Image: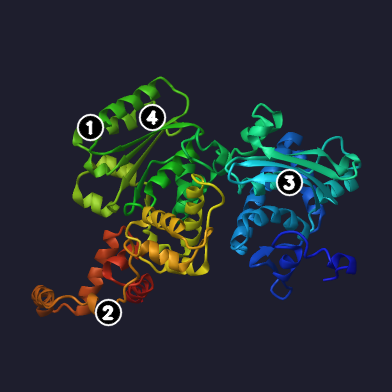
Amino acid sequence: MRISREEMSLLDRGGRPTLADMLEKMTFSPTRGSIELNGARMVLARATFGVDLQDELVRRFGEREAMVLMLRLGYRSGREDAEFVRRAWPNLDVGDAFTAGTRLHMVTGTVRVETMHNDFDFRNDRFSGDFLWHESVEATEYQRRHGRATKPVCWAQTGYAAGYASVFFRKLILYKEVSCAAMGDKACRVVGKTVDDWGRDDPFVRMFLEEVLVTKAESLPRFDREESGGTTADAARIEDLIVAPVRRDLERIAEHRLNALVTGPDGSGRFAVANWLKAKRFRTAELHNVHGASPALPEVLQKISQALAKGAAGGQVLVIDAPESLPDPLQIDLLRLMRSAQARPEKFLLVGISTASPPQLQRQGGLRAELFYALSTACLAMPPLDDRPEDIEALATALLARSAQHGAGAAPVLSDGALEVLRNFRWPGNLPQLEQTVRRAALMAETPGLITAADIHAATSDQATPVPDAAGPASQPEDDRIDQLWRELHPLLQQGQTLDQIVSALEHRALAEAGGNTSAAARQLGLTRAKLDYRLNRKRD
């Protein structure tokens, strides 16, 4: 890499990470075809790509829609970069992490940022900034291709600045490009303020709120937490992480407008699946969440029936917890509602939530056959948290971010040691237990803003237990249980059954009980998933 002598002295200026810090963490491996910045994959691309994308969007969708899409992509990229900086340099002062966005944009060749004014107070959610963008790639390439512009064109960079800054505040930060090099100005100038300081009647603010942040993940930004009861972009991101194991099946269920049965242990995310389906199926919908044995259920069914009959705007979503506990008369009423002309798939969605697998529900006989089959056309089995060690980091980080909305400053960062401890603990309480643990660790942390392995151990000392050694003495059954088991097996062995045949039958029984979920069956048998897979596949050979 060639850097002029004059520029070398500038690389260490500013907060951490400086430009020199970033360059030191950059790895270029031409043989592997990868460029990494502190472990994050980067791409070296021609500067014309951005203007090509902008031109194609304008041609296909018009200028306004193209601007909205570029702002949205920039906003997402900015948020991701802010989270990356906090993870990659976990011991940074929050002010340095906040201003690192300008240096990150410079080291990637996007723009050179000159700060005219930058005043921020994270505790009181106060921010105002005024910056000059020199050599903006969007402005430079636009002017080279199209000549002088009549209005600002740095859409993606403006969205990026908003996304990056908003991660550090509990209010949305928006930037406006008030002058642009593509219009003939010496440099692009951007001004940043909180959404409240801009004013919600401002046309750009309204467009940003109503059109740029239209996806569920951004539709309710942090500043709106009092009005939305705490539901925010981070909550939507958590929901996406929770449903990841069944995301592909969820997409198909939503596409075909099917009702669904969601099974799994308490706390595994079954209700998040129901919420995801609701958001995917309906633009607006009324959600009714009720237990199968609740005395309020008849009233709920009547309310849904009346809303459907009146043709009310939006959909009606009924989530029944433990449908196997539904009294028979109510099952008949529910079937009658589902068969009515008003309960069309575009207006009505039924989701059953149960800890029992479909075979268990069928054997228990609590559900009428018609209702069971109506629900079990689309079955989703949510795995327990113990079966998702690879998701622990993302889930814990997102849960911390949600928790931080109720306090001041940014969410604490989990050290590598803390993540290792989390991955090696058993979580019988699943997601609620994980959330309680990381929140408790954040409260007890010795170093503010950083959660270490010791903090996790302290937080879990009376909550979770390490994964036990399967070969230890605690796993050995008692002598009387061995005697009882021998008495039950002995007649089978006398009849010519082999031990392998008996064990194989037990394995297949456990698999059926788990609804075909190999991980759940392995856990019930005290085996690893890999070992049960091997045994089942060996039987087929």
Residue tagged 3: 118
Q: Earlier in the sequence, mark 1 or mark 2?
A: 1
Residue tagged 2: 472
Q: Is residue 330 visible?
A: yes
| Number of numbered markers | 4
Residue tagged 1: 295
What is the residue that sits farthest to the top in this orientation?
310
Which one is closest to the eye, mark 3 or mark 4? 3
Q: Amino acid at mark 1?
A: Pro
Residue 271 % position (x, y): 38, 45
Between the residue at mark 3 and the residue at mark 1, the CA separation in whole angstroms equals 58 Å
Residue tagged 4: 343
Residue 51 % position (x, y): 80, 48
Q: Amino acid at mark 4?
A: Ala
Between the residue at mark 1 and the residue at mark 2, the CA separation in whole angstroms equals 48 Å
Q: Which mark is residue 125?
A: none
Residue 268 % position (x, y): 37, 53
Give neighbour class at mark 4: few <14, some 14-19, many 20+ (Cα, 10 Å). some
Which one is closest to the eye, mark 3 or mark 1? 3
Element at badge 4?
Answer: loop
Q: Earlier in the sequence, mark 3 or mark 4?
A: 3
Q: Of 77 and 14, which appears nearest the observer?
A: 14
Residue 194 against residue 84 in the figure, above or below: above
